[in-house]
Image: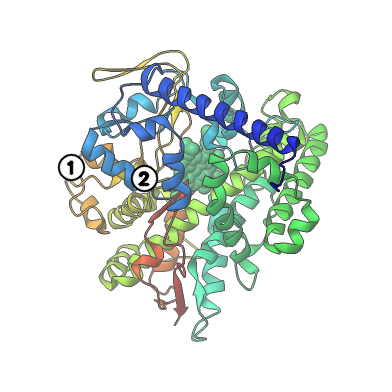
Amino acid sequence: MEASIPLSTYGTYGIYGVFAAGLAIYSASLILYRLSLHPLAGYPGPWVAAATGWYEFYYDVVRRGKYVYKIEEMHKRYGPILRINPHEIVINDPEFYNDVYVAANTRRTAIWPRYRTGIGFDGKSSLPGSHTMTQNHELHRRRRKPFEPFFSRLGIDKMEPMIIEETKLLNDRLRSFSGSKHVIRLDHVFSAFAGDVVGRICCESPPDMMNHPEFGKDWHNLIENIVRQLLLFMHIPQLVSLARMIPTGFLLRVYPGAAGFNVFRQLAIHHIVDAKREKLSAEKVQQDTKSSVFRHILSSGMPDSECDTERLSREAMVLFGAGTATTARTMGFMCYYILHNPHMGDRLTEELKDVMAGYPNKNLPTWQELERLPYLHAMIKEGLRLSYGVMRRLPRISPDVALQYKQWTIPAGTPVGMGAYSLHTDPEVYPEPFKFIPERWLGQYNPNMNRNWVPFTRGSRNCLGMNLAYAEMYWALSVLFRPGAPKLQLFETDESDISQSVDFLMPLPKLDSRGTRVTVH
Ligand code: HEM
């Protein structure tokens, strides 16, 4: 006798069938629309990238941060302008850079929120977010503007004594390992150095990572673990909401390093609350080495609605995140090359001989004087060129007017990006582009080298902390390579441990990198 299939089973199959057919029809129509009627239909690029975001997902998530290289290949095949996913245009033409990344008085610029998804400061919860996560041009300006004087060249001059104090700690801590054969990771040391500087700027009291036995190891690992997940969160933003549902207590039990975030957030909140209370008794706050950026913001005339403690603490978290990882990575990167090539170290030491003779007590140069030392300057230019800042395109949106690139009229509202990776490795501008050659920046050099050099991007959403990063890098290298500095020696580190090869929004070296490791002699 035949076994009978219950009617309800047919019903269930029927529902699945209808769902599958619906999904197939929806997907086919969407693909058809993207390839034929979408405003970007007809732009150069592989049809599959234009049809579906899964193409980018494959290179980003499955192949782990490799879309930047695929885009390079596409440029070779299709030319300088590409549609790299259904919504986004990428251009590889340095002459067009300043048309995309414009100053606020040239044109309004919005960001594409997709790129901020997953970082976690996106203002999706009840409070508005930090300036960098703010999509709207005017609101971004209002939120960022009060920070600008603080991070201007003049602003950094005022905080220079604090930066010098931190370099003394850097010097003394490294010296304390002299002759011990103890292996130190310079990327952890620089995370601590940069983190304590930003900590003092945000909270007046630093997280004091420089005095921690393993320097900024936890903070470094935390950022790196987050960075490794960013592309997955960017492609599947629903995961961000899911991740937010994980109770903090549980998270801290399975991953104690995450406490670093909370520690800093609490420091920031306490400081902002104190600063608000003290502001009531002292109306105008002068920026000096002791006054934090938040005291300055609170006395800048920013409306109360924008000075909510939680919102400001998000600004602090952004400054802390943005201000540690990139600077630390660039410093570790440069140190590798200087230590690996003794002639570079010797030349630097010779150049620093006079200007640093009185360090740490007398006749100290300013960071702007250090900037004028040709070889040191060249070293930092080359370090930033090959560590890229951010490797990938950083899409900007012109919300009101179309952009004209050659025969292409890019509709208003389209995310358009250009990547430091392609500009910084253009062989016509930088011969042997993947070689670290500071000397290329000495004497008369091709002016296009400066045109192509964009580690901090440009325009109204460029790096807020650029001058701070310069001051930290000039000072740290000057202290570490002056005559009489602690003698660092590389320990089992090769170029693959430091060269940026994976593009996870923030570039990273190979995933099993052991960092820049040294001993002190
Ligand atoms: C070598 C060091 C650094 C490099 C290469 C670098 C690079 C960059 C780049 C490429 C951007 C643009 C990101 C985007 O468009 O999505 C950016 C933005 C930003 N950076 Fe930096 N950065 C460095 C250090 C710092 C430091 C020390 C701070 C501050 C404390 C900082 C704070 C910021 C902030 C707040 C933004 C967002 C600006 C906005 O959205 O208006 N950065 N940085």
In this picture, residue 411 sits left or right of residue 238: left
What residue is rendered at 47% in x and 28% in y? 460
Q: CA distance from mark 1 to mark 2?
A: 26 Å
Residue 48 makes an appearance in the image: yes
| Amino acid type indicated by mark 1 | Asn
| Amino acid type indicated by mark 2 | Val
The quadrant of the image that shows the C terminus is bottom left
Specify how the rendered protein is coloured: rainbow
**Front position in the image: 5 or 246:** 5
What residue is rendered at 44% in x and 69% in y? 516
19 shown above or below 231: above
In this picture, residue 368 sits left or right of residue 264: left
The residue labelled by disc 2 is 68
281 shown above or below 64: above
Outermost residue, front side? 1
Residue 146: image x %, image y %?
60, 30
What residue is rendered at 25% in x and 70% in y? 343
What residue is rendered at 71% in x and 38% in y? 9
* Disc on the earlier residue, 1 or 2: 2
Give the secondary structure at mark 2: helix
**Front position in the image: 367 or 340:** 340
Are the two marked residues, 1 and 2, in contact with CB atoms closer than 8 angstroms?
A: no
**Front position in the image: 103 or 497:** 497
The residue labelled by disc 1 is 446
Res. 414 mark: none
In this picture, residue 451 sits left or right of residue 179: left
Residue 353: image x %, image y %?
34, 66
**Front position in the image: 436 or 243:** 243
Residue 74: image x %, image y %?
28, 39
Residue 372 makes an appearance in the image: no
126 shown above or below 475: above
Give the secondary structure at mark 1: loop
